[in-house]
């Protein structure tokens, strides 16, 4: 089962991707991890990519896509994979689609978590981390996991521990920049999503598109996702 996963920062894409990965027993492949791995191992592609990164330039698709293909051809991907973080624009979508087909790695599903841009931003800025356990979910903008109150201040809803924020979660400029890329239907990530939707309409059922409403809680979204994938709990 070969899957592309899309969703804006703040949509819970990482959480839902992990659920699918466990259900299908396939690797969750992230483009950023592929870059770091190639650079740390000193592969030929990694050396080329590092040169661009060191100069503060974007790594060309001619380097990025072969890196991704190399990863998807590894033994642990033989039964399928879930690719996350790429493509980010329509040109990358077209080139990746062509490269996957040429390598005999056709897509089965494109999954998109649909979430309003303001709500996605609120969810990022509303995240609170428990000092006792980062796995205790707290978010001031999500009713189901709002922090508790004790002594006039917010505390972890699970254990009552102190809460803190990540600095990048409060950086509105950085969040807006990432979201501007994702939500653009002209040359951003949503344009890439629309490319695959168009390919699915033109195809013969080989590629299926799954759209998920990202507004409900994690449990509700995962239930909808697994149902649409035909996976029983």
Image: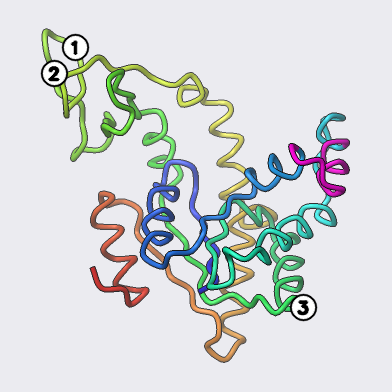
- Residue 28 is situated, as x and y percent measured from the top left of the image, at 51, 55
Please identify the quadrant where the C terminus is shown. Answer: bottom left
Q: Is residue 34 in the magenta section?
A: no
* For residue 3, above or below residue 168: below
* For residue 82, above or below residue 160: below
Q: Secondary structure at mark 1?
A: strand
Q: Main secondary structure of the magenta part?
A: helix
Q: Residue at x 57, y 55 (%)?
A: 29
Q: Secondary structure at mark 2?
A: strand
Residue contact between numbered discs 2 and 1, judged by CB atoms under 8 Å: yes
- Residue 161 is situated, as x and y percent measured from the top left of the image, at 21, 17
- Kindly give the residue lying farthest to the front in the view shown: 75
Read off the residue under disc 1: 153
Number of numbered discs on residues: 3
Start-end of magenta stretch: 40-51
- Residue 109 is situated, as x and y percent measured from the top left of the image, at 51, 73
* For residue 140, above or below residue 15: above
Estimate the spatial distance between the alpha carbons at disc 2 and disc 1, rounded to whole Å: 5 Å
Q: Earlier in the sequence, mark 3 or mark 1?
A: 3
- Kindly give the residue lying farthest to the top in the view shown: 151
Mark drawn on residue 102: 3
Q: Nearer the viewer, mark 3 or mark 1?
A: 3
Residue 142 shown left or right of residue 150 in the figure: right
Estimate the spatial distance between the alpha carbons at disc 3 and disc 1, rounded to whole Å: 57 Å
Residue 208 shown left or right of residue 186 in the figure: left
- Kindly give the residue lying farthest to the bottom in the view shown: 204
Q: Residue at x 43, y 57 (%)?
A: 113
Mark drawn on residue 149: 2
């Amino acid at each position: 089962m070969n899957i592309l996963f899309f969703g804006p920062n703040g949509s819970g894409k990482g959480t839902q991707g992990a659920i699918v990965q466990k259900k299908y027993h396939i690797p969750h492949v992230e483009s950023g991890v592929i870059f770091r791995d190639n650079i740390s191992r000193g592969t030929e592609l990694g050396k080329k990519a590092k040169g661009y990164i060191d100069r503060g330039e974007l790594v060309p698709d001619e380097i990025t896509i072969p890196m991704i293909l190399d990863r998807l051809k590894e033994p642990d991907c033989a039964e399928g994979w879930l690719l996350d973080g790429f493509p980010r624009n329509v040109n990358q979508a077209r080139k990746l689609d062509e490269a996957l087909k040429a390598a005999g790695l056709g897509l089965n599903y494109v999954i998109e978590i649909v979430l309003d841009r303001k709500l996605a931003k609120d969810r990022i800025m509303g995240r609170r981390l428990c000092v006792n356990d980062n796995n205790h979910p707290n978010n001031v903008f999500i009713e189901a996991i709002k922090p508790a109150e004790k002594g006039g201040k917010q505390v972890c809803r699970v254990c009552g521990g102190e809460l803190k924020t990540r600095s990048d979660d409060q950086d509105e400029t950085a969040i807006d920049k990432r979201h501007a890329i994702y939500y653009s239907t002209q040359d951003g990530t949503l344009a890439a999503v629309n490319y695959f939707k168009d390919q699915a309409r033109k195809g013969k059922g080989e590629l299926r598109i799954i759209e998920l409403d990202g507004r409900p809680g994690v449990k509700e979204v995962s239930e909808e996702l697994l149902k649409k994938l035909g996976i029983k709990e």
